Amino acid sequence: MLPFPFRFTKFRLYSLLYCEGPYRYFLPLPTRLHFLLGLLLFSLISVPVGCKKPATGSRLRLRLGYFPNITHAQPIIGLARGTFKEYLGKEMDLTVKVFSAGPAAIEAFLAGELDVAYVGPSPAITGYIRTGGRELRVISGAASGGAVFVTRQDVQLKNKEDYFGKRFASPQIGNSQDISLRIYLKRLGYEPKEKGGTVEILPIANADILTLFLRKEIDAAWVPEPWGSILVNNGNGRIQLDERDLWPNRKFATTIVVASKKLLEGQPDLVREWLRAHVKVTQWIQQNPMEAKRILNQEIARLTRKPIPETILDEAFNRIELTWDPILPSLQAFFERSLELKYLKGGDIGNIADLSILNEVLREAGSPVLSSP
């Protein structure tokens, strides 16, 4: 059906144009033509064209993945305080899935089960390469630092000879701490036993690493916070190395934010609102560290059923910088290390990051923009 202005009968339109019927007495031809042109223009602007609106009764949906670690403070605190809901709107159906390590999160992401995820750089790189860059993009950073190499108090690793025959642990094969541990040992001249070397590298969940520390069944572990501080305080451990000391300016990406390419291309406004909330939460945490730690601990206790003692939380928090900068040079370094370890066979990550929407958000907030790859 024609829009309202054209709901005339064929006879009336004909009469208006050719001055028949009642119009003949008061409408000269130029006026009639102008009137018809006005009707046409009004009809064009009154008909919605290209508007994408959910069907009646449907809701927008966003599926989020993150870990119950303090290096994932933004989603934990932002969800608890309602910041993401505030920016996304009440009509948003926000579903959350909690993971224990990055590779599992990326597998869910590539299976189409997540739209946005907070993960370590190495799993994100692996997912990007495996799909030829078709599935995901890095849209922001979340945390820098917060990974440590911890030894048992009775284990001495002063010289490279001391590493011979030792048993080490990382949270999962292929995650960021696993790659850092393997590269560190490789630089010392050690290979794992499965490759004919003389050290063992075991993929063990963080909570189980503590148990094995206490049983003296492993000698050291490369872990994210707060597990580093937990091993020191509860597992009779000692900080052998803070990973920040291995990076330029002591900065490297520990947690980044990835989004599906489908979400970026199909719903950029939704991504924009998410990043506005992400930046807002990051700023709030930086300005309110005590309250942020209280909420963070409360939520970690809810998710894991194990609250973190205040002294451990303070110690761990001091090794982390929460940020929206993905520190792209460190992603390139993790990529090159994955190639060296044969976790990846090739590829290129030159286009892994899309910071265009984040930079729009930063300009709005009056913050410096980030350089794109």
Image: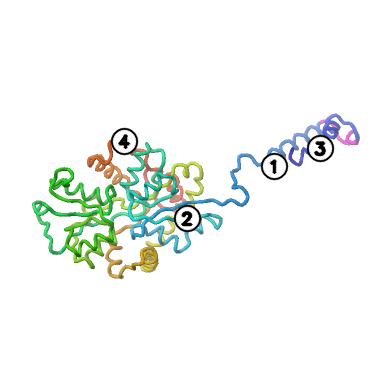
Amino acid under label 1?
A: Ser
Q: Quadrant of residue 195?
A: top left
Q: Is residue 268 left or right of residue 109?
A: right
Q: Which of the two discs, 4 and 1, labels the residue nearer the N terminus?
A: 1
- Look at the magenta stretch and give its main secondary structure: helix
Within 10 Å of disc 1 (Cα), the crowding (few <14, some 14-19, many 20+) is few
Q: Position of residue 338 (x, y in %)?
A: 26, 42
Q: Which of the two discs, 4 and 3, labels the residue nearer the N terminus?
A: 3
Residue span colored magenta: 22-29
Within 10 Å of disc 3 (Cα), the crowding (few <14, some 14-19, many 20+) is few
Q: Is residue 349 left or right of residue 62?
A: left
Q: Which of the two discs, 1 and 2, labels the residue nearer the N terminus?
A: 1
Q: Are marks 3 and 1 in contact (CB under 8 Å)?
A: no
Q: Which mark is residue 188?
A: none
Mark 4 vs mark 1, CA separation in Å: 50 Å
Q: Position of residue 343 (x, y in %)?
A: 26, 41
Residue identified by numbered label 2 = 95
Within 10 Å of disc 4 (Cα), the crowding (few <14, some 14-19, many 20+) is few
Identify the residue shown where x is 47% and y is 48%: 271
Depth check: give the residue in front, 112 or 122: 112
Q: Nearer the viewer, mark 1 or mark 2?
A: 2
Residue identified by numbered label 1 = 46
Amino acid under label 4?
A: Gly
Identify the residue shown where x is 16% and y is 54%: 167
Residue identified by numbered label 3 = 8
Q: Which of the two discs, 3 and 1, labels the residue nearer the N terminus?
A: 3
Q: Per the image, is 94 magenta? A: no
Judged from the image, the secondary structure of the residue bearing numbered disc 1 is helix
Q: Is residue 313 left or right of residue 269?
A: left
Q: Nearer the viewer, mark 3 or mark 2?
A: 2
Q: Is residue 332 above or below residue 118?
A: above
Residue identified by numbered label 4 = 347
